Amino acid sequence: MNRAVFLDRDGVLIEDVHLLIRADQIRVLPGVPQALATLANAGFHLVVITNQTVVARGLATEADVQQVHQELNRRLQAAGGPPVERFYVCPHHPSGTLPAYRIACTCRKPAPGMLLQAAHELGLQLNASFTIGDRLTDIHAGARSGTRTVLVQTGRHRDPAIETTESMDPNLQPDRICPDLPAAAAWILSVA
């Protein structure tokens, strides 16, 4: 079975420092490398899906974001974890500062575009996959793509919804709520 765990970046893998633009701002959350290792060892592809409005706001370039992801993978591996197989980034924002990125796209969560793209490119079975995020927009993207969803409480899970042009179902709930990624990984392994 070709299955994945789709992971939001900020608030799931690393501390959400709000508008992270440099690799030296990365703080890997406790237990993340080991949790990723257990998921990879169980045969899951590890795929990050992340909205990065810092690009649309002109605070960082797409190349800057890529450098952050390279450093994140380096740190995960240095701590004994596996690298993230693929990073999917939405650089858009409906109110972005830079006109080229100020669009209503199909990739910005809660839209499922990044998950659908990953499924197509990696040949993934979405109904056998999971999405882990710290915001309801992550949960909506996962549910809309057909994955099971986990909300972790290590990031901005209590914050108001992000700005989006997508409608969101106020009654949608995650399949599971966990305190952190290690607990989410344990639940996934218990039901997968």
Image (spheres, helix red, strand yellow):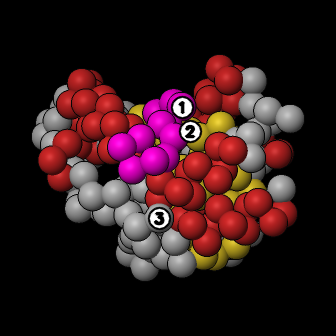
Q: Magenta stretch mostly in which secondary structure?
A: loop
Q: Quadrant of residue 151?
A: bottom right
Label 1's element?
A: loop
Say left or right for 34 vs 67: right
Label 2's element?
A: strand
Q: What amino acid type should be assigned to the residue bearing mark 3?
A: Gly
Sooner in the amino-acid sequence: mark 1 or mark 2 = 2
Tell me the distance, in whole angstroms, between the alpha carbons under discs 1 and 2: 6 Å
Q: Are marks 1 and 2 in contact (CB under 8 Å)?
A: yes
**What are the residue bounds of the magenta stretch?**
77-87
Magenta region includes residue 83: yes
**25 up-or-down from 82: above or below:** below
Residue located 16% across and 43% down the image: 22
Name the residue beneath numbered marker 2.
Answer: 47
Within 10 Å of disc 1 (Cα), the crowding (few <14, some 14-19, many 20+) is few
Q: Quadrant of the N terminus?
A: top right
Q: Residue 119's spot in the image, x, y percent? A: 69, 30
Q: Residue 167's spot in the image, x, y percent? A: 57, 57
